């Protein structure tokens, strides 16, 4: 897996049509076909972001990717990103995250 920078990926997504209003991101993704019931759309979305879907199949890989993408973010920025993640998951009707991921995100958002 290569190096990823959250803010750079976010800027790329915005230039490709991602709404600047974060409360609309889940709606945007759903209109692009991304949902828990459509893994193919999610794979395509990951590829557009430059990610290999096989690199995020395991929980450990997801945690590693989040850490890589957000290295250097302040606690305040992490909390804002966490709120965006929560909104997106809710808008996509994803249900509960796996316990390991939920626990990691809860700790991650307050890390310094």
Image (cartoon, rainbow, N blue to C red):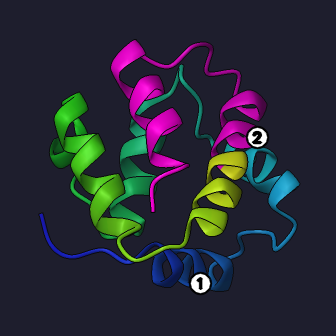
The disc placed on residue 87 is 2
Question: What is the CA distance from the residue labelled 2 to the residue labelled 1?
Answer: 19 Å
Give me the residue at 71% from left, 69% from top.
Answer: 18
Q: Is residue 80 left or right of residue 60?
A: right
Quadrant of the rendered image containing residue 57:
top left
Give me the residue at 16% from left, 43% from top.
Answer: 54
The disc placed on residue 98 is none
**Residue 36, x across and y down, in percent:** 54, 23
| Quadrant containing the C terminus in the rendered view | bottom left
- In magenta stretch: residue 28: no
Q: Nearer the viewer, residue 5 or 48?
A: 5
The magenta segment? 85-112
Give me the residue at 47% from left, 76% from top.
Answer: 9
Q: Nearer the viewer, residue 73 or 4?
A: 73
| Quadrant containing the N terminus in the rendered view | bottom left
Callout 2 secondary element:
helix
Residue beneath disc 1: 11
Quadrant of the rendered image containing residue 70:
bottom left
- Classed neighbour count for the residue bearing mark 1: other residues with Cα under 10 Å, few (<14), some (14–19), many (≥20): few
Work out whether 95 lies above or below 17: above
| Residue 104 visible | yes
């Amino acid at each position: 897996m290569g190096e990823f920078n959250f803010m750079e990926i976010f800027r790329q997504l915005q230039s490709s049509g991602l709404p600047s209003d974060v409360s609309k991101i889940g709606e945007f993704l759903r209109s692009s076909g991304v949902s828990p019931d459509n893994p193919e759309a999610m794979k395509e979305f990951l590829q557009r972001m430059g990610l290999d879907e096989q690199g995020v199949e395991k929980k450990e890989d997801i945690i590693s990717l989040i850490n890589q993408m957000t290295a250097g973010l302040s606690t305040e920025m992490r909390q804002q990103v966490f709120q965006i993640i929560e909104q997106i998951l809710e808008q996509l009707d994803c249900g509960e995250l796996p316990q390991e991921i939920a626990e990691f995100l809860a700790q991650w958002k307050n890390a310094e």
